[in-house]
Image (tube, helix red, strand yellow):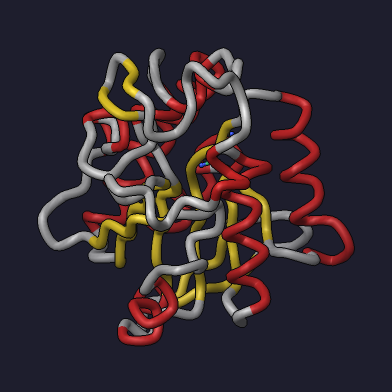
Amino acid sequence: MLTIEINAEPEAIAIEIAKTAVVMIDMQRDFLEPGGFGESLGNDVSLLSAAIEPCKALLSAARQHGMLVIHTREGHLPDMSDAHKAKVERGDPGVRIGQMGSMGRILIRGEPGQDIIPDLYPQEGEYVIDKPGKGAFYATDLQSILQKNAIENLIVCGVTTEVCVHTTVREANDRGYRCIVPGDCCGSYIPEFHEVGLRMIKAQSGIFGWVTDSHTILTAISA
Ligand code: TIU
């Protein structure tokens, strides 16, 4: 079993590669490109693009070393039976979930906007989990996939830091997974929340997990 040590805050962490999955949270056109859900909420989507290259490098290393890779996509069934009214009724009434945007119906499964951005597109054999909520464990098969693959540690990347990444890290933490978050592989529409979100994860002796960066993980993997 190959074990690597990753420098991180609040302290370095040793992980077995075979028991570690890379989880790419919601790197979807709906969040990263104009005309999708992120923009419909009033956000400048260009703020998330800095995370693409670091995610690409990490994904490439994970694939090279045979690590389990899981992609998630936030979105709802075309009939929206899995979309709570309380979620759908928020925001500008003209551009809500299910309405037509420039990349198809906003945040609806199967629409172009709901898919993963081309730069980080899943490869054959990688898991793609469609999730109706912010957390990747809510109403999905994620836990059974992790159990089936004997995963104990998650490297959690994606967008947005304080929303879907944070919710997923919190859910995972309560289910016994060690979460390592490379900050440069995450992004927020609100830079201050990105910074504070990362600080919240590593505070109090790593209350939710460990924070590092992609370069540190790549160095540890290739050592
Ligand atoms: N709005 C926002 O910051 N995020 C989301 O709605 N979903 C995710 O974080 N994926």
The reply to whether residue 191 is visible in this rendering is yes
Query: Is residue 176 placed above or below 89 in the rendered structure?
Result: below
Q: Left or right? Give the position of 3 relative to 187.
A: left
Q: Nearer the viewer, residue 40 or 175?
A: 40
The mark tally for this picture is 0
Q: Quadrant for residue 22, please give it.
A: bottom left
Query: Which residue is found at the position 32% from the left and 59% from the top?
Result: 129
Q: Quadrant of the N terminus?
A: bottom left
Q: Left or right? Give the position of 112 relative to 166.
A: left
Ligand 1's quadrant is top right
Q: Nearer the viewer, residue 17 or 38?
A: 38
Q: Residue 150: image x %, image y %?
A: 38, 86
Q: Nearer the viewer, residue 50 or 26?
A: 26
Query: Which residue is found at the position 53% from the left and 39% from the top?
Result: 88
Q: Quadrant for residue 197, please give it.
A: top right
Q: Residue 196: image x %, image y %?
A: 80, 39
Q: Residue 202: image x %, image y %?
A: 77, 56
